[in-house]
Amino acid sequence: MADTPILSVRDLNKSFSGIVAANNINVDVAPGEIVGIIGANGAGKTVFVNMITGYLKPSSGTIQFNGKDITGIEPRDATHEGVCRSFQISQVFMTMSVRENLLIALAIARESGTAMLLPVDHPDLTDECERLMAVYKIDQYADSTVSTLSQGIRKLLDIAMAVVANPKVLLLDEPTSGVSVEEKFGIMDIVMSALKEKGTAVLFVEHDMEIVERYVHRVLAFYQGEVICDAPPDEALLDPKVIEFVIGTDYHSGGAQTEAADA
Amino acid sequence: MSSNLFKLVGRTVLAGGALAAMVATGPAIAKDTINVGIASFLTGPAAGPFGVPGRNGAELVIDAINAGTLPAPYAKAGFAGAKMNPIFVDESGGNAKQVGEYRNLVEKRGVDAVLGYISSGTCMAITPVAEELKKLTVLSVCGTPRVFEESNRTYVFRTQAHAVGDSIAAARYVLDKFKDQKGYTGINQNYAWGQDSYKFFDITMKKLAADTKASDNPQFPKIFAGQYGTEISTLSLDPAKLVHTSFWGGDIEAFVLQALVRGFFKDKQVISSVGGSAVDSLGKKFPDGVVMGTRGEYGLLVRNKDEPLNKWFVNEYKKRYNAYPLGPSYQYASSVLAYKIAMDAAAEKAGGFPTQDQTMAALKGLSWQSFGGKVSLSLADGHQAVHPVGYGITKWDKDKKEPSVSDVKFYAPGCIYAPAGQKSADWLAAGMPGAKC
Amino acid sequence: MQLITTMLLDGLSYASYLFIVSVGLTIIFGVMKILNVAHGAFYAWGAYAAAYAIGLAADNDWPDWSGFVLIFVAAILVGIVLGTIIERLILRKMYHEEEVLIVLATFGIFLILEDVILLVFGVNPYFAYQPMALLGSVKMGGIIRDVYSLTLFGLAILVAFGCWYGLNRTKWGKLLSVVIFDREISLAMGINVQMVYLVTFILGATLGALGGAYIAPTISVAPGFGIDVIVLSFAVVVIGGMGSIPGALIGSLMVGILRAIAVHKFPEFELFVVFGVMAAVLMIRPEGLFAPEKARRI
Amino acid sequence: MVSMAWNDKTIRWAIIGFALLAAAGWLLPTWILNNVMFGLARGLAVLGLLVLWRTGLVSFGHALYFGLGAYAVALLEKYGGVTDVFLKFGAAIIVAGVFGFLLGFVLRNYRAIFFAMLSLAFSMVLYGVLVKMEVLGSTDGFSVTQNTILGWKPDGKYPLFCFIVLTCVIALSAVQLYLKSALGHLTTAIRDNELRVEYLGYSVARAIHVKYLASACLAGAAGGAMAMALGQVDPDSMVNWTVSGELVFITIMSGAGSVVAPFIGAIVFEFIRTYAFELAPQAWQLIVGGTLLAIIFFLPGGIWSLLEKPWAKGEADNG
């Protein structure tokens, strides 16, 4: 952690009518760093992501991005700053085609106001759109209505739409949940290679420890709203607290993964 | 499609040519039947007490004229010899709808004339359209003086006197009969008719009895509101004894029912300018002692008038519809009759079937003996009728088991209308100069 | 003082009327999530049925008090017949549709029922003043009032209590709250949701009809008087919170009393008051003053 | 801009169709001309509702803007003596626009039934004011009889008809271009998923505000055009909740498939009503209500869905 952190979280707390969902969280993320967020259901992972991206306002604490305080800003302003996210349940425009989804995302991402007035089939937007679909390998579904596509494709689209605004920090909320086992690594390979060139810092929530082991530089383990471990993966996955409260003993004994993808 | 279009063009051109040829004064092509739109409330709260009796009155007289069974001097069959085919249309649904329907009557269904209309609101709305479409329109019931006082009309006539006379006569009647009344108030509907009715009653009272106190809280509920509990409370709290109302249709009936149980009529002297329908429909429930008008020599006030035309009308109406003719029945019948008289006269003068212009010329300034009494189109350059307006006091006749009125007094037109050429408001403000009572 | 008493009594009596009319609307919305425009037609049908029955009774020299029985009989009959027909034939096929479409369908039903009234009962007004005449009048706050309008107050309390009891103290009420909370879960639990909907709709329709039937003796029952009732009860229900029975109570009281004040002191604002309050409440508390607590879904 | 409009197939055909309509108007019997004119005027408001509907919003109070437009025209003529069609029409749009802009700040935060109810409340406030105020004509309303075009007083309604046709073409083209733009695609996007739109960096509230303003202006234009075409304004025909209900009815009847649909639907509606009224003066509501139910049950895509197939086929043929 030699560089100045791109994201810096200090003493972050959040409670919902008495229930503590985030307890004194302190995290720094360096530019380009890949961070895995793990924890059982209800451990506070999504709450954390929601606070960073402005969906929830923290009860106390600060979030700094690139030296600027972004605590409690609106999601759209977080996006403008360069903090983007994807969702556990893909948040895409279900009645539109993949291409239309991306075109809208691209038009919004253009800083100039007039981009919104251009017809969506304007070459300014379409060229970039075709390129993105190729990178994320969803070009063969370009004209399909999203509601007819598999979860895996929707996830890819969801992530592609989050990347359109060229974020400096990208938060992926369970990018592989609800996706078939065969698709999982495929998706992660596509996403990670696409992001690598850009030097984007990525924080992703994940239940599958194999994926965590393969892609991350660092692991944040959550339990009851607290970060109980913040270390490189080889270290973190052997931490007794992590084993007890997060991954269970089955993982290292080679048993089947206990935790099903979130519903 | 294209051939139809072609025919249409051809027809338009032909019609235009025919029209041009006809512009000269000669008589129009004789017709066996004429189509006339007759508008009244067929749905909504005013249908039962006003619209349908009005429609029936028109229907009765149209059938009699078509068959030639009307008593002398109107026994000649037909309208300038033609049978009238009435097209009855509904007046409810708001002014804008009525304007649209009026256009349809004239432009789509090609009527020769339009008769009827009850609400002052509708009359105000369709009058400019009638002028625009240049279609002879005879208004039957509506009362607001604004129709003719706001601007001169060419194509619109009204065979019913306007509301000013009803209000002046009401004021004169109460001042004649009830000297000491500690002031007056009113409950009237919040539109042209109600506003005008109370306004003119108010001004007349101020002019004729300056010491009588006007209430500072007269009520103006929305038309067809139906529930008047709160308004009745307000009126009850008011020290004024006289309560003027121009409620009509279902509103007067609802008001009477709700006020009756609360002993309102024991405390207050109510003057109703047009509540005649309620007297019949409520029967023995209707309180005695209410000052009741029928806006002319119509309905209750002339029920027993011994005149051949009136007797014929009352008897035939009763026979056919199993009820006494109400004010609107007379008013619609009167419009139909005036139209016949004008058509016949115009036909005689032109020596053939009359054009609309010829009929209008004959209608202008017409004076005729109608079913209840004499009516003259003497105001607004011969377009606006005047006739006597009377009031009486209601009393349930136990022996005959039907309503009756006592102390009936009619006021002659000269007493209650501004002379031709003067606006009613100005004339009233000047203290009704030249009124002959 | 006299004025205040009068305004209060007028307001309470109008509020009672509003409550009886709108409580059915709020129950249907609460359970079925349907904003039922046809409610105005139930009201009109109730009034017609009651007026017709009371008139018939009077013609056959039944005692005047029979009118009170007939009012309830008429309301229940109208509720069962119209409620069943509409729910079974039309609404049941639409539950999966968008809210708006259902509202529009009820609008269509309203238009049809309005004209069917004309075809069945004709255009002549009906009078059913016997119950009102029977109860006579009483002097309160310096002016004479009719006892009948005061009984509205009692009926409103009765209806309110009945609803409260039914919902909170009976098995049926518990069933209803499950269905309100989550339709899918109740289906999974084996509750006959279709039956619950049907009964709810009939109940709502009966209450709407009761409003009309009870008011019938005081008015001239004539075509077209259901239209204004619709928006008026919408206003009441929205102010209190759609689907909430205590809300309908509060909404009725607010509208009733404010309107009474307006009629006495500022007649021009009579209508403005009602809808002004409705807009204000929606702006400040969109869920209404007494909205049932909703589970937040992420 | 103009070439962009002409390149759009819908706009191109609409321009040709409306030009033919304007030409046919010269020959049409007056009553048909009138009904078409009323239909076109109402169609403008329905077009506005269509923009909202595509976002998933339904206003049960658009009679507010319809009425504001109509009354702006009537009051301007009555108290200001203004007769010029352009001025009156402009005033209708501006008045509706100003109110739409201001109320938009409130309504943009509302969805679903709450949006519908708050719109209804606002429109009924206006209704309550109009009905009770004598200076505003109370239930009678006003006549609108003087229509001049740049000082010329035409005889007959044909010039006004052409003016309304022209307005409709402009409005329709503008809405079509808008819907094709990224901003317009946001319409559907917002209906699908507001959360995502926010996370993409666009303010949903602002987007809805823009749409609301546009639909208010269109409804105001519709009211203004209607007032001039009909020659009469009054609260029950222009502002009451039944008018809003009718507008929503026509929207559903037309179908959301095309910007042309509102005009077709509104004209059809006008004729249904005319004939219902003529055939059954005591039961015309029954016919209108029955039509509504029939459309909901048997033609859920509206009238447009009947035309859509041949239209799409034509599209395919054109490549």
Image: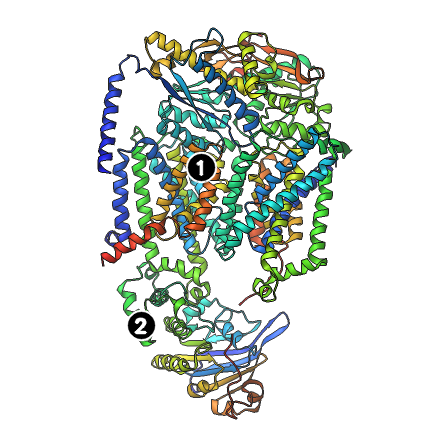
Could you tell me residue B77's position as x and y percent? 42, 11
Looking at the rendered structure, the secondary structure element under dot 2 is helix
**Scheme of image coloration:** rainbow
Residue position marked by numbered label 2 in the rendering: A140
Numbered mark located on residue C56 in the image? none
Residue B172 visible in the shown view? yes
Could you tell me residue A22's position as x and y percent? 57, 76
Query: Residue at coordinates 59% horizontally, 11% vertically from top-left?
Result: B410
Q: From what the image shows, is residue A180 above or below residue B252?
A: below
- Foreground: disc 1 or disc 2: 2
Question: In the picture, residue D80 is in which quadrant?
Answer: top left
- Amino acid identity at mark 2: Gln
- Amino acid identity at mark 1: Tyr
Could you tell me residue A103's position as x and y percent? 34, 65
Could you tell me residue B350's position as x and y percent? 33, 9
Residue C241 visible in the shown view? no
Front residue of this view, candidates C160 and B312: B312
Q: From what the image shows, is residue A171 above or below residue B245?
A: below
Looking at the rendered structure, the secondary structure element under dot 1 is helix
Residue position marked by numbered label 1 in the rendering: D71
Q: From what the image shows, is residue A71 above or below residue C154?
A: below
Circle 1 Cα neighbour tier, 10 Å, few/some/many (<14 / 14–19 / ≥20):
many
**Most extreme residue toward the right, as rendered?**
C139
Is the C terminus of chain B in the top left, top right, bottom left or bottom right quadrant?
top right
Q: From what the image shows, is residue D140 above or below residue A147?
A: above
Q: CA distance from mark 1 to mark 2?
A: 55 Å
**Most extreme residue toward the front, as rendered?**
C60
Chain for disc number 1:
D
Chain for disc number 2:
A
Question: In the picture, residue D230 is in which quadrant?
Answer: top left
Query: Residue at coordinates 50% horizontally, 25% vertically from top-left?
Result: B120
